[in-house]
Amino acid sequence: MNLLRDNDAVAVVPREFPTNKGGLCQKGWTAAELLSSPDRLTSPMLRDCRRGKLRPVSWDEALGRIAAEFRRIQGLYGRDAVGVFGGGGLTNEKAYLLGKFARVALRTSNIDYNGRFCMSSAASAGIKAFGIDRGLPFPLEDIPRSEVILLVGANVAETMPPIMQYFEAQKRNGGRLIVADPRATATARAAHLHLQLTPGTDLALANGLLHIAIAEKMIDHEFIEQRTTGYESVRRIAVSYWPERVARITGVPVSQLYDAARLLGRARRAMVLTARGPEQQSKSVDNVLAFINLALALGKVGRLYCGYGCLTGQGNGQGGREHGQKADQLPGYRRLDNAEDRARIAAIWRIDADALPGPGKSAYEMLQDLGVEGGVRGLLVMGSNVVVSAPHAALVRGRLAALDFLAVADIFLSETAEMADVVLPITQWAEEEGTMTNLEGRVIRRRRALEPPPNVRSDLEILSGLARRLGCAEGFPSEPRAVFEELRRASAGGAADYSGISYERIERENGVFWPCPSEAHPGTPRMFLDGFATPDRRARFHPVEYRSAAEEPDDDYPLYLTTGRVTAHYQSGNQTRRVASLCKAQPEPFVEIHPAIAQTFGIAENDMVRLTTRRGSALMKARFNHAIRMDTVFAPFHWGNGGCANLLTNPALDPISRMPEFKVCAARIDKVVAAHPDVASEYPFNSQ
Ligand SMILES: Nc1nc2c(c(=O)[nH]1)N[C@H]1C(S)=C(S)[C@@H](COP(=O)(O)OP(=O)(O)OC[C@H]3O[C@@H](n4cnc5c(=O)[nH]c(N)nc54)[C@H](O)[C@@H]3O)O[C@H]1N2
Ligand SMILES: Nc1nc2c(c(=O)[nH]1)N[C@H]1C(S)=C(S)[C@@H](COP(=O)(O)OP(=O)(O)OC[C@H]3O[C@@H](n4cnc5c(=O)[nH]c(N)nc54)[C@H](O)[C@@H]3O)O[C@H]1N2
Ligand SMILES: [Mo]
């Protein structure tokens, strides 16, 4: 994006760039409004006691208080009693420095981030199958060249509008698009074939498609032989996923299963892409592995215009998962439990490898233990609004309240910041420098275009100031470029190797794709073409069996509840709920329900309803959708307070990635009051 200034007003102008080709989504167009929003935090604030009010204080007092509290807590309860929660929206520089801050300045093992709730399952599956996790192993520009694309639980038209043009181009080229989603989303409506599966049944669908591919002799045995291992164990499992059984589990008609398998199997070039639908489940690593198995068996990976890919969500969702803000990770996508990796990073950080803590708790596990014996008692949140976006939100809110001390750095007073003892106001994207890595693995630059308001600071300045107060005068520069130079060195030789990428190259080359191990290296837009990142250079099949969701509907909770997004709002809504035009487009929490089912519960369109699960209840407007499965309701998670969808979600975690089951739980729906025509303006959850 570029910014256009007209006297005092600032407007966003899309920039011609290979990824978005000048396109921007609604939120991009309105992002400038947030720069001058009257809601912006403009001074550090501190609360003298838990019941007290936040009052403006100096930076020195705010940072001094945080350092003192963290020291006190660690003195009493040990180093791990202080935790850090980061975000995939942070620049690479911030993510890197945050990880270093936790391990070096705080020496705590407890750091994790919201990416755990985002693409951690696809990341785990990618590493298992290919030996490396880069969301898309090819550039977006390859999409139009693929003949058939299976999009699983990805609502690109609404969540990544600028990227939809690649799928439109693919269709114009004569390609076929298949979408698997329990709802007929705008994306599904753009597809040739929509598989409207029951929530949580993706694994059965993938195994079922493989079954048909085997039965119809569409398997690429030569590819399997030359470039993979483990096929036989997967074949044996697929045998029992006969189409009638799969149709029963998934609700997808047998004929459509055949159509999908044949389209994929007969194409010369095909792609399988997943997003949060199959990835936010308690078995999501296996879900993704099952789709990777399918793509491998068809020989559609590691070839031009083919491949499996994960559509990464957040602005820096890719880079955010590489530089060490993850509980088990060191920069360069290195591992905290690997002696060699530890030694290497310790040397760069100029500490003893033994001084590096071990792996810590995953995001939800850290949150659920806040304030309890052995848990985190002092927390720094940088780049997430967990009160709204973490599963089982009532429990998370209670745990945050049980902390000894909470510090939050944000642009606005989020629901999480409202609970903090110290709130730090930060610069926004247009006011700072840095790099991000987009969903293609392309490292791009964020340029400073505006002066920040006088009393706000960047996250890097905050980390630098805190580190100094915690005894680390060196090693925490507040200048993005200095941090990036260290990140380059730290990543050298790691899986996500940035060592050949410089600010100048990014500028000159319109971004550089990692891995890029030297200045002379061109970067790697396409991975796996001549080998995978495993020791034997082969991709690995993994035998995975379908199992039901952690919670299935029953007599008390007869409906599937799934959650996700709408175009007008972003994530926890802390930013978009402050933009008038976006609030107008989507003013309030709502639940989508099929009219035929609504009728059986006596619910009319726009009625206020209470959605209830075993975790709690939320109040929402009922919106009719003829194109959602009858057994399923859908609620976006963009609102807090009583309309928060995460009051309902199930924190059952995937055993490998520790991803919560945001996409499936069992719910009940009851009518509350009939809607009044102007209820929207008085609606309690309308405001921020
Ligand atoms: N407008 C907007 N855009 C965004 C965001 C936003 O908040 N708002 N957030 C960004 C981020 S961080 C992310 S991660 C991406 C997410 O992008 P998406 O993954 O596209 O978004 P979701 O709405 O979470 O889920 C996608 C679809 O999964 C479907 N689904 C639900 N349950 C299942 C299931 O069991 N199986 C399958 N196959 N599908 C299922 C839902 O109906 C939904 O249409 O969007 C990014 N873009
Ligand atoms: N029910 C349900 N819950 C979900 C999901 C779902 O599909 N269903 N999706 C999950 C997913 S994929 C994601 S990614 C998470 C996202 O959920 P959150 O992590 O809550 O994401 P945001 O709302 O973007 O929160 C980011 C916060 O940081 C602030 N911020 C923005 N930029 C910066 C920065 O540079 N520095 C600092 N310090 N602060 C900044 C913003 O103002 C905002 O308050 O939600 C997860 N929760
Ligand atoms: Mo996300």
Image (cartoon, rainbow, N blue to C red):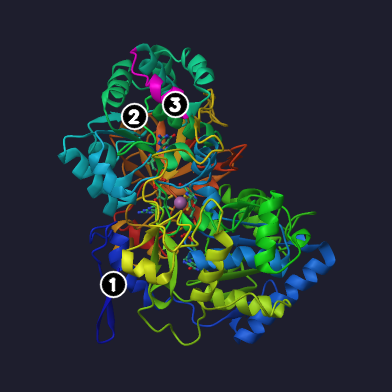
Q: Earlier in the sequence, mark 3 or mark 1?
A: 1
Rendering coords of residue 21 (x, y %): 23, 58
Q: Label 1's element?
A: strand
Mark 2 highlights which residue? 196
Alpha-carbon neighbours of circle 2 within 10 Å: few (<14), some, or many (≥20)?
many
Q: Is mark 1 within 8 Å of ligand 2?
A: no
Mark 3 highlights which residue? 226
Residue at mark 3 to residue at mark 1: CA–CA distance? 47 Å
Q: Earlier in the sequence, mark 1 or mark 2?
A: 1
Rendering coords of residue 147 (x, y %): 24, 33
267 left or right, relative to 361:
left
- Label 1 is placed on what type of residue? Asn
Alpha-carbon neighbours of circle 1 within 10 Å: few (<14), some, or many (≥20)?
few
Mark 1 highlights which residue? 2
Specify the segment rendered in magenta: 216-227
* Residue 673 vs residue 527, the one in the foreground: 527
Q: Quadrant of residue 38?
A: bottom left
37 left or right, relative to 388:
left
Rendering coords of residue 540 (x, y %): 52, 30
Residue at 47%, 31% in the rendered image? 200
> Looking at the image, is 633 positioned above or below residue 521?
above
Residue 594 in view here: no
Number of numbered discs: 3
Ligand 1 sits in quadrant: top left
Residue at mark 3 to residue at mark 2: CA–CA distance? 35 Å
* Residue 10 vs residue 342, the one in the foreground: 342
- Label 2 is placed on what type of residue? Gln
Residue at mark 1 to residue at mark 2: CA–CA distance? 39 Å
585 left or right, relative to 334:
left
